[in-house]
Amino acid sequence: MTKNMGSADRIIRVIIAAIVGILYFTGTIPGTLGIVLLVLAGVFVLTSVISFCPLYAPFGIKTCKINKK
C-alpha cells in the first residue's frame, strides 16, 4: 500500500472521529446511529494512522505530496 492521504486529510479525519466519539459517549448520538458513526470514526482513525484510504485507490485520488525523483 502506498500512501494516498496527506497530513491535512489525516488531521481532519482524526478531529471528526474525536467529535463523533465525544458525542456518542456523552449520549448526544444514541442507539444504532451512534454505533454506526462510532465504527465509522474507528475506520477514520485507522486510515489516518496507516495514511491509506481504500476508497481513494479506485478513483486515483491522492491528497499527499508527490515526490519527484
Image (cartoon, rainbow, N blue to C red):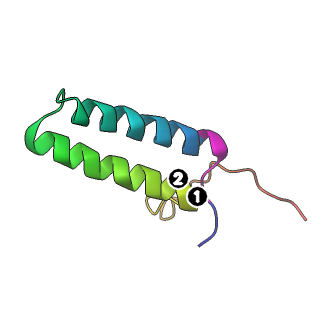
Going by the image, does 10 lie left or right of 7? left
Q: Which residue does the numbered mark 1 point to in the structure image?
A: 51
Q: Is residue 7 magenta?
A: yes
Image position of 61 with respect to 17: above or below: below
Magenta residues, as a range?
Answer: 4-8
Q: Is residue 13 visible?
A: yes
Q: Which residue does the numbered mark 2 point to in the structure image?
A: 48
Image position of 1 with respect to 41: above or below: below
Kindly report the distance in space between the C-alpha atoms of the residues bearing marks 1 and 2.
Answer: 5 Å
18 vs 63, nearest the viewer: 18
How packed mark 1 is, by other alpha carbons closer than 10 Å (few <14, some 14-19, many 20 or more), is some
| Rendered image quadrant of residue 31 | top left
Residue found farthest to the right: 69
Q: Are marks 1 and 2 in contact (CB under 8 Å)?
A: yes
- Residue 30: % across, % down: 12, 35
Q: Residue at x 18, y 47 (%)?
A: 35
Going by the image, does 32 lie left or right of 9? left
